Image (cartoon, grey):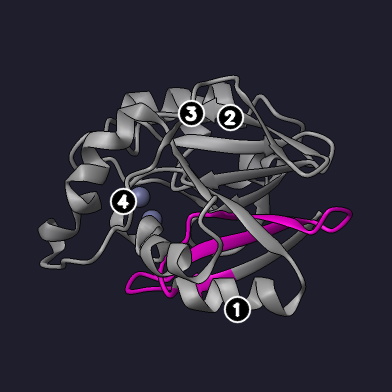
Amino acid sequence: MQILTFVLGPVETNAYLVADETTNEAVVIDPAWDGLEISKAAQARGWRITQIWLTHAHFDHIGGVAALVKGVQPELTIAIHPADLPLWRAQGGAPLFGLTFDAGPEPQVRLADGEQLRLGNLEFEVRHAPGHTPGHVLFYCAVEKVLFCGDVIFANGIGRTDLPGGDYATLMNSIQTQVLSLPDETRLLSGHGEETTVGWERRWNPFLTQVL
Ligand SMILES: [Zn+2]
Ligand SMILES: [Zn+2]
């Protein structure tokens, strides 16, 4: 598995271009902004972007979808959990921040907890982790020991729960059951900030010490 990280947009969101280098198929997890930059990087490596997976519908995670869709072939699919569709249709909350943007075509694939997603020869498990938003999901590749965790957990932080649809108790439960249940060596690739691991956050995350 090859992973390229882009830090994009008004609130420095991580977008991940993930490829199976044996088939050259690629997925973009959260095309945060500047979709053209992401598609050019894929082209330069000979990768074909076939899918977009959204951890959740906040505007800073979907702002690059429209440009990305224009830059690649038409059969690209966009996937989201149905509980975040209302947020997607509300421009990902952008109007709350005084912003408007082109969100691109509506996602046509509906994700469900426990579902397996395929990228070339790689398999990912969808893990529903509400609390930051109602339809937030994580993408877990057990063989590669990687969890793409969006805005659920960060290095030494957790997702905010003060935006519409957020709920603190729900988020803490999601972190316990869907993140901390994974092996310590699992890499956490978050929606913002540096990479971390399950083991590090289990021991040192100041927001989790009270529930351990
Ligand atoms: Zn968010
Ligand atoms: Zn975010």
Determine the secondary structure under disc 2. Answer: strand
Toward the viewer: 43 or 84? 43
Query: Circle 2 sits on which residue?
Result: 126
Instruction: Name the residue located 57 percent from the left edge and 26 percent from the top edge.
Output: 178
Residues in magenta, as a range: 6-34
> In the image, what residue type sits under mark 2?
Val
Decide whether residue 76 is among the magenta residues: no
Q: Residue 99 appears at what percent x and percent y?
A: 15, 68
Front disc: 4 or 1: 1
| Sequence-wise first label, 3 or 1 | 1
Disc 4 CB within 8 Å of nearest ligand 1 atom:
yes
198 or 32, which lies in front?
32
Q: Which residue is mark 3?
A: 111
Q: Are marks 2 and 3 in contact (CB under 8 Å)?
A: yes
What residue sits 32% from the left and 28% below the top? 83
Mark 4 vs 2, N-terminal side = 4
On the image, numbered disc 1 is attached to which residue?
A: 40
Q: Amino acid at mark 3?
A: Leu
- Residue 136 has which mark? none
Give the crowd class for mark 1: few <14, some 14-19, many >=20 residues within 10 Å. Answer: some
